[in-house]
Image (tube, rainbow, N blue to C red):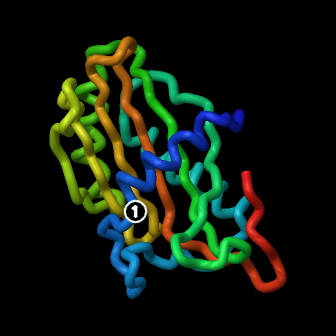
Amino acid sequence: MKTRTRASALAVPLVLTILTGCGMTDDKSDGVPSAGTSTSLDAADTMEKVSSGIYDLMGVKGKASESLPGVMDCSGKDTKTYFRIFHPWSFTPASASDLDEAMERLKRELPKHGWRIVEYGPDTSRNKNINLTADNDKKKVSVNITKMAKNDPPKLSVDLVSGCYKVPDGEEVERF
């Protein structure tokens, strides 16, 4: 997951729709928890590590798309000092028959690694894709994983979004 793609910017509305106001608990009235203080680059590095951990939990051979995290606003907060990180990517198993195994492993393994599954089941699309949404309250990250079995090739679509970060005093949010 090395090259930054403009396509990731297109995923922001989807990520916001799916994950804004998710079940991560905190004292914020808008449902988005504070993720602490960080620079945009450091927070993006942290998000890549979280994504890598999810990739490892899949436990099947395959290829992840090459997209990097991006920066988005925290609703209702100063855009110069507050931000969130999003990271959309996909996973295509080496064998289409491994798609179910990867999704089942995630459903089973995520809770063992600090994730709380808040939603699991088919979506309302014609394809009835299976969606798994999970929150990690400790890491202040939510993930939505969609099993797209009828795509060619079949794949998992993975969208992560962080809580709201504040940049260190004297710095501004770096956008990418």
In the rendered image, residue 64, in percent from the top left (x then y), is placed at 52, 29
Up the image or down, 43 lies above or below 69; here it is: below
Residue at point 50%, 23% (across, down):
63
Side (left or right) of 111 relative to 1: left
Q: Which residue is mark 1?
A: 20
Q: Nearer the viewer, residue 136 or 105?
A: 136
In the rendered image, residue 42, in percent from the top left (x then y), is placed at 70, 62
Label 1 secondary element? loop
In the rendered image, residue 142, in percent from the top left (x then y), is placed at 40, 59
In the rendered image, residue 85, in percent from the top left (x then y), is placed at 58, 58
Callout 1: 10 Å neighbours few (<14), some, many (20+)?
Answer: many
Up the image or down, 13 lies above or below 59; here it is: below
Classify the position of the N terminus by image quarter.
top right
Residue at point 55%, 40% (across, down):
10
- Residue extending furthest toward the front: 76
Up the image or down, 97 lies above or below 78; here it is: above
Q: Nearer the viewer, residue 3 or 14?
A: 14
- Residue extending furthest toward the right: 170
Side (left or right) of 149 relative to 68: left
Residue at point 67%, 72% (across, down):
79
Side (left or right) of 100 relative to 58: left
Q: What's under tag 1, amino acid-wise?
A: Thr
Up the image or down, 136 lies above or below 125; here it is: below
